[in-house]
Image: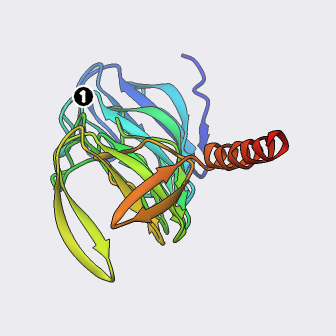
Amino acid sequence: MHNIKAEVVKPNQALKLEALNKFVDRNGIMREAGEQWIFDQEGSFIPDIDEKIVDRIVGIILTDKKAIHVEALVNHSNKKAGEVWLVTSEDTDVYIPPVQVRIINNNVPIVTLNSRQYTYLNNPYDDNNIPQYGKKEMRKGEQSFFLKPFESIEEISNVIVITAEEAISVFALENFEDKHEENGKTSKVNRIAGERWLVVGPKEYWPPVQVRVEYPFKKAIFKIEGVFYLFKAEKLFLSIFFFFFLLFMLYRIF
């Protein structure tokens, strides 16, 4: 005979147990030899002669700022082996993984955008909760969200503010239907991949995923007989400077 030491299961903890032989456990469940399961009832625990303690598990506390990613090791409940998903505090305050599940990321931080910020989400999930690999969608504030497995975000940027004397040059990465605003009216414009055009102020511009802003800094803009002309501000300044310098030199000479 040997002494069996009692274990204390504390709050937010659990024990991983394994059956040494086929038997019925304390909850009336038939266990097969080698089967493992989780015991999470708080208090003193003395293992049965037909079971052993494999590990002590400390639960992960989830908050409105922290979530986790998990993976099913075998078919489990409504999950298939290899399936991954997000677990947040809306699901549970403390997560103790069952033996059929493993944690693949125990610290997923929340992404927060203010009302002036946007970012692009890569591999977003569709309405059936399936990741759309290779696709991209815009997320703009004000909002907060957790990234699901396989999702990633690009750099968080501020909305581009264009004044009445400015414009930016943009480039279409693919064919898409754009919205054009002029004189308070909005119309639809079909953009072709490779097309370049000017976005003229005054306005706030949220670049759609199909567009690349070619000049992240704004340019001075002039409209002559209905045609917009775009100049780099620094080049325009230098051009004006050299123009007057040339006039001054000609005045000195003649």
Q: Position of residue 27 (x, y in %)?
A: 32, 47
Q: Position of residue 24 (x, y in %)?
A: 26, 36
Considering depth in this image, is 26 or 243 the residue closer to the camera? Answer: 243
**Near-viewer residue (17 or 147):** 147
Q: Residue at x 57, y 46 (%)?
A: 232
User: Quick one: 206 or 30, which is closer to the camera?
Assistant: 206
Is residue 199 in sight in this rendering? Answer: yes
Quick one: SS at disc 1? Answer: loop
Q: Residues within 10 Å of mark 1 (few under 14, many from 20)?
A: few
Measuring from the top left, give residue 182's x and y in whole percent.
Answer: 31, 75
- Residue 201, horizontal then vertical, whole percent: 46, 68
Query: Is residue 97 shown above or below 219?
Result: above
Q: Which residue ends up furthest to the front in the rendered image?
A: 254
214 on left or right of 210: right
- Point out the image quarter for the N terminus: top right
Q: Give me the residue at 19% from left, 44% from top.
A: 130
Say how the picture is coloured.
rainbow
The answer to whether 169 appears left or right of 178 in the picture is right
Quarter of the figure with residue 183: bottom left
Q: Residue at x 43, y 33 (%)?
A: 103
Seen at 23% across and 41% down, the residue is 131
Residue at mark 1: 82
Camera-side residue of 190 and 61: 190
Type of the residue with mark 1: Gly
